[in-house]
Image (spheres, rainbow, N blue to C red):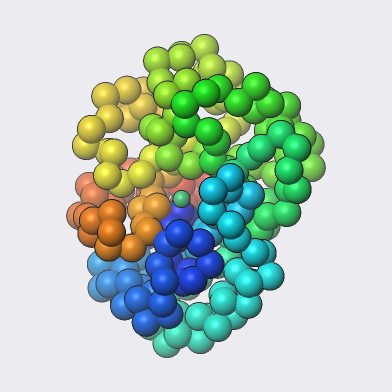
């Protein structure tokens, strides 16, 4: 099993703070059958300042420990799409991008930005799809995004609350979006319960 969205890489965003904490978390992942982890620190976020060079450096520091634990890791990022900001990011497995968006107001630039990234050869994964108020119940927009081949990721804690996306088979990935203990522990049993979605994601990412 794998996790494509988390803030375990320590000291680089609003997620985990220490390398010890990250090691402890990764050991827990391993014990619960997660063998592959994509680290996805925030990039371009309006309120969380991050530095791509620091992210890369921290990943190099953590890598040997991951190897020791026996967990396969990749560096990626969670790119906050904004209309006019620098678009530096770390793609996920070379040509996927995990994106996040404003939650309350529809980002008018959304379709254009996605299209631009797709023209550059990237495939889009929309992080925590359940969070966007402007997308909920907007079947036309959901359908449009799906027609554009945008993949949807749902956070673990929402799986049991969802009444629409799962039933309509719209979810391609589940992930923890883990920020540390402050937001509660990870319910690893959900990975097993929703294994069909894990399998779907595995095929998309060719893992
Ligand atoms: Fe996140």
User: Would you say 168 lies left or right of 51 here?
Assistant: left
Image coords of residue 187 (percent x, y): 22, 55
The image quadrant of residue 196 is top left
- Residue 69 point in image, percent of width and height: 38, 83
Where does the N terminus fall, quadrant-wise? bottom left
Q: Choose top left, top right, bottom left or bottom right for residue 35.
A: bottom left
Determine if residue 70 is in view: no
Of the pair 152 and 1, the residue shown nearer to us: 152
Q: Residue at x 53, y 67 (%)?
A: 12
Q: 110 and 66: which one is in front?
A: 110
Side (left or right) of 164 relative to 148 = left
Q: Residue at x 40, y 15 (%)?
A: 137
The residue located at (58%, 66%) in the rendering is 75
* Nearer to the camera, 29 or 53: 53
Q: With 195 as the anchor, is 204 left or right in this view?
A: right
Query: How many numbered markers are drawn?
Result: 0
Quadrant of the rendered image containing residue 16:
bottom left
**Can residue 144 be seen in the rendering of this structure?**
yes
Task: List x then y, in percent, for residue 150.
Answer: 57, 33
Q: Position of residue 104 (x, y in %)?
A: 47, 26
Above or below for 42 versus 130: below
Residue name at image x 38 percent, y 32 percent: 130
Q: Is residue 4 above or below residue 146?
A: below
């Amino acid at each position: 099993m794998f996790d494509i969205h988390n803030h375990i890489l320590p000291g680089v965003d609003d997620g985990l703070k220490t390398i010890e904490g990250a090691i402890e978390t990764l050991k827990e992942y391993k014990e619960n059958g997660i063998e592959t982890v994509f680290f996805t620190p925030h990039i371009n976020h309006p309120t969380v300042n991050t530095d791509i060079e620091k992210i890369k450096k921290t990943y190099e520091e953590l890598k040997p420990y991951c190897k020791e634990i026996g967990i396969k890791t990749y560096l990626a990022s969670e790119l906050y799409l904004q209309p006019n900001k620098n678009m530096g990011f770390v793609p996920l497995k070379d040509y996927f991008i995990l994106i996040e968006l404003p939650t309350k107001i529809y980002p008018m630039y959304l379709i254009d930005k996605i299209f631009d990234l797709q023209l550059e050869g990237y495939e889009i994964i929309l992080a925590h799809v359940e969070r966007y108020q402007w997308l909920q119940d907007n079947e036309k927009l959901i359908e449009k995004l799906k027609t554009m081949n945008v993949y949807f990721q749902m956070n673990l804690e929402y799986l049991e609350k969802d009444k629409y996306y799962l039933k309509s088979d719209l979810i391609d990935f589940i992930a923890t979006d883990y920020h540390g203990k402050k937001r509660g522990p990870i319910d690893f049993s959900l990975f097993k319960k929703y294994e069909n979605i894990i399998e779907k994601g595995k095929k998309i990412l060719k893992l």
